[in-house]
Amino acid sequence: MGAGMDMPPELVVDRLLDDPGTRIIVCCGAGGVGKTTTAAALGLRAAERGRKVVVLTIDPARRLAQSMGIDSLDNTPRKVAGVAGGGELHAMMLDMKRTFDEIVESHADGDRAAAILANPFYQSLSAGFAGTQEYMAMEKLGQLRARDDWDLIVVDTPPSRSALDFLDAPKRLGSFLDGKFIRVLTAPAKVGGRAGMKFLNVGMSLMTGTLNKLMGASLLGDVQTFVAAMDTMFGGFRTRADATFRLLQAPGTAFLVVAAPEPDALREAAYFVERLGAERMPLAGLVLNRVHGSGAGQLSAERALAVAENLEEGGIVDQEAGKAGLGAPAAHSPAGGSAPESEGVEAGADADAPEGADVEGITAGLLRLHAERMQLIAREQRTRDRFTSMHPDVAVTEVAALPGDVHDLAGLRAIGERLAAGVPAGA
Ligand SMILES: Nc1ncnc2c1ncn2[C@@H]1O[C@H](COP(=O)(O)OP(=O)(O)O)[C@@H](O)[C@H]1O
Ligand SMILES: [Mg+2]
């Protein structure tokens, strides 16, 4: 172990949170790595350090949402109770369909909006195509930013199959709306007259089969209403998608890539880091979440295994067993003093209890567990070092794996403290 030459630069989370120039933090990464937890923990920490924060969560676990008072989906930020310090934390859970509806309502007048919302084509479109959730998160971010009510917006991202959906969604929605499918549908509205009707009929006869499957009868009328109304909004979608993209590239935005210290997760994180770079999105750093540690790190895996083996074989632990491990001084050598645990082991073995064999068996089992943990820690460090050697400029912070899941403000605070503590010295 030991601090290698490739220690990553440290991600100083509190500096990021305290900087009034930081207006948006986006937590991204593969599914299940702790994006939602990290976003909520950062939001709470920033609020308790005095900022007025809103956190936009996408899919909070039920208990976490309840503890933040956002378990109902009303698509508006709610003030979180129990936040200490001078700031404020507001939280909301994204309701994708509701956000889509709000866009329609704000861009079409009453009757027209009602017609669109009731339209089956709209209903399948608004929930159906890939990337909707990603796109709606961006729409909501744009809305929150436009209100200018908060010092800091922390954004969680959807549990995408691919981490890249998040960046691709605005473009994909744009090309969907600009695409052939919609162009054919909108052609009559734009061209008009007999030629347009003829084109409509050709287009429709080609697509009727597919569309019928999508939404059944009374198709044509629905599509026509929808298209006529959406037509006025196409420009709007495209413009806002572009505006949100630029907002993400702006200096007040900071991306954090969250990943587990496992090869697959870090490969995906590396890919994400590269993609953010290619899109000129400002990357603040990498959060390595659920990193394992040990309170007994001074007892090496090798030594623990050697002692365990010795206990299981003979039940007598002597200096030779200690030496068999690492060539480290045996525990009761006066100059040693580096392995107090093994002194405990030897004391146990020397105690000569009637159930000595059982005690030794259990002790050996515990030592083997400890060895496994130490090997896991070493593997995680190697994985991190590999990432760092590929991306030496990416700042890193580590968050220990907590014993239980994170479902209340106290848990979020604990995560926040670890986020701020950086990479433990000597890791
Ligand atoms: N450092 C941690 N220690 C313990 N549990 C964690 C930690 N980070 C996340 N969790 C738990 O892991 C689960 C998934 O986390 P979540 O933030 O929902 O991931 P994501 O949003 O990336 O899918 C949740 O149950 C959460 O409480
Ligand atoms: Mg999540």
Image (cartoon, grey):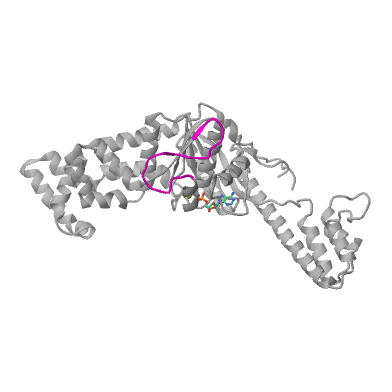
Q: What stretch is highlighted in magenta?
A: 68-88
Identity of the residue drawn at 75% across and 66% down: 365
Confirm whether the magenta stretch covers residue 15.
Answer: no
Compared with 360, 385 (above or below) is above
Identity of the residue drawn at 55% across and 54% down: 264
Confirm whether the magenta stretch covers residue 72.
Answer: yes
Of residues 319 and 351, the one nearer the viewer is: 351
Is 81 placed left or right of 181 in the picture? right
Q: Mainly helix, strand or loop, the magenta region? A: loop
Of residues 283 and 119, the one nearer the viewer is: 119
The picture places residue 306, in percent across and down from the top left corner, at: 81, 63
Is 301 placed left or right of 106 in the picture? right
The picture places residue 249, in percent across and down from the top left corner, at: 44, 32
Identity of the residue drawn at 29% across and 48% down: 126
Q: Across the whole image, how many numbered discs are drawn on residues?
A: 0
The picture places residue 250, in percent across and down from the top left corner, at: 45, 30
Return the residue found at the far front.
82
In the rendered image, which quarter contains the C terminus?
top right
- Find residue 91 and report its image quarter: top left
Identity of the residue drawn at 68% across and 40% down: 7
Return the residue found at the far left.
194
Return the residue found at the far right.
334
The picture places residue 273, in percent across and down from the top left corner, at: 52, 41
Is 64 placed left or right of 2 in the picture? left
